[in-house]
Image (cartoon, rainbow, N blue to C red):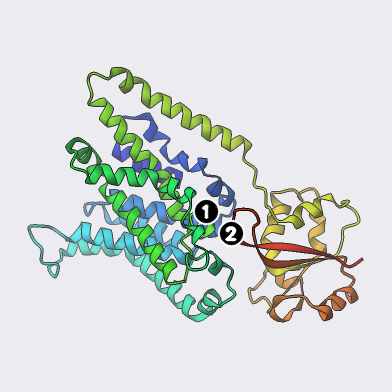
Amino acid sequence: SCLTLTLLARKWAPQYLLSSVAGLILMLSPLLCHYAFEIRPYMLELLHCTLAVYLVCCCEASWSRKKLLLFGLALAFSMASRYSSIFPAILCASFLAFKFFYHPENPNLFVIDEVKLTRFLFLFVPSFVIGTAIVVLMAAKQWQVATSSNAYHLMFLIYSNPSEVFNWFTALLWLPMLILLTMRLLPLKIFSELARKYDLFIGFVLALNILRILVDLGRFIPYSLMFRFNLPCHTLLVFSWVPLLLLFFEYCSLQPNRSACRKLLPPIILVAMVLGILYHSFFFTRNDPDPSVSYLQKLSIDPPPKILSAINIYPALRYSFEYGSLQDRPHWRDHIYFYGNQYPKQKDWSVKKKFAFIASGGEMNEVYYRLAQYKHFNLILESRNYLLGGTSKRPGLSTVIVKLD
């Protein structure tokens, strides 16, 4: 994703060194760094979005079929990682259809150039196949789960929790995009002309954010920019600082009386950004706030306790054993079992092999506690909904640790 956005910045303004490292600005985001470890669901979704915006800004009908097919396969492959990737895909296809087929001198949309149509299909037929599969899977398996009244992500909707969207963090993320939009629309000729090259980028980012807000208002997927549900919009808004800075550099270069600003400002900003990236890269740690992990870390390594865990705590435990504070006790994983409201259906999933029993409603009660004691478990990690304390109203899941011995 960093490389894709860097290529986009170099297309806009290759004369500035900032363009050659522009994509690395994503590494300044703690949220993106936190989920960078999860390649399949989140980073491939991010790659799909950055490929989509790159194609919208750079793709031409004159590209060869081979090149278009290569991008089309990459777009389709990354799209398959997550259902929400269908939104950037739809926008990408819409923008490029307009770019390929609309011409002011020939406004009849029903007369389409066959060569351009062939190239358009080379680019988007793979994504159409994957998109159809996503819709079928959503209708067949995931829709009821995603829209059930107790679905975790529904707690982050604007309807359920307005402060998840209307906050100072979201306003700060939107700041560079709003400045770009203002410079483009205000009757200031020099800024308007310099910002014209960013029109497609601005249009795509605005369209994607508006679409995701509408989906949130429809009570399907949260728009929240502070959590994992909307990393593509978060990423593009973070990257919006790059075109804004490039626009400012170009404006300074046209001011002959400000030679110091023209010569010193670009390297100063570049050095500041690189230092920030290096600092964040070396000192960033992926700490999971789940209290069960810190509690388990305090226990002696041997003998390993026999643990019964709620099935939705599995990701936190897994990453703690692979990357986090429980790396020093890998043999514990053989002593962890799981419970949930239904038997896991995924084939060859490690949780399926270690599934202890079904708990009705996914919650423990006196009967299940006795069953856990009968099976000689030492600890139970229960997952329960809660609201963060203090000034935050953010919903979440906390772990209640039950000692049976």
Q: Is residue 147 above or below residue 82?
A: below
- The percent position of residue 35, horizontal first and vertical second, equals 57, 52
Q: Residue at x 31, y 56 (%)?
A: 68
Depth check: 283 or 47 in front? 283
Q: Quadrant of residue 204?
A: bottom left
* Residue found 24% across the figure and 64% down from its top: 118
Mark 2: few, some, or many residues within 10 Å (few <14, many ≥20)?
A: some
Q: Is residue 331 left or right of residue 362?
A: right
- Asked if the residue under mark 1 is in contact with the one under mark 2, i.e. CB atoms within 8 Å, the reply is yes
Amino acid type of disc 1? Met
Say which residue label 1 marks. Answer: 226
Q: Is residue 241 visible?
A: yes
Q: Is residue 73 left or right of residue 320?
A: left
Along the horizontal axis of the image, is 302 left or right of 181? right
According to the picture, the residue beneath numbered tag 2 turns out to be: 394
Where in the figure is residue 346, as x and y percent of width and height? Answer: 63, 73
Q: Secondary structure at mark 1?
A: loop
Q: Residue 307, percent across and down? A: 82, 65
Inspect the image, locate mark 2, and give the three-letter code of the amino acid beneath it.
Answer: Arg
> Residues under labels 2 and 1: Cα distance?
10 Å
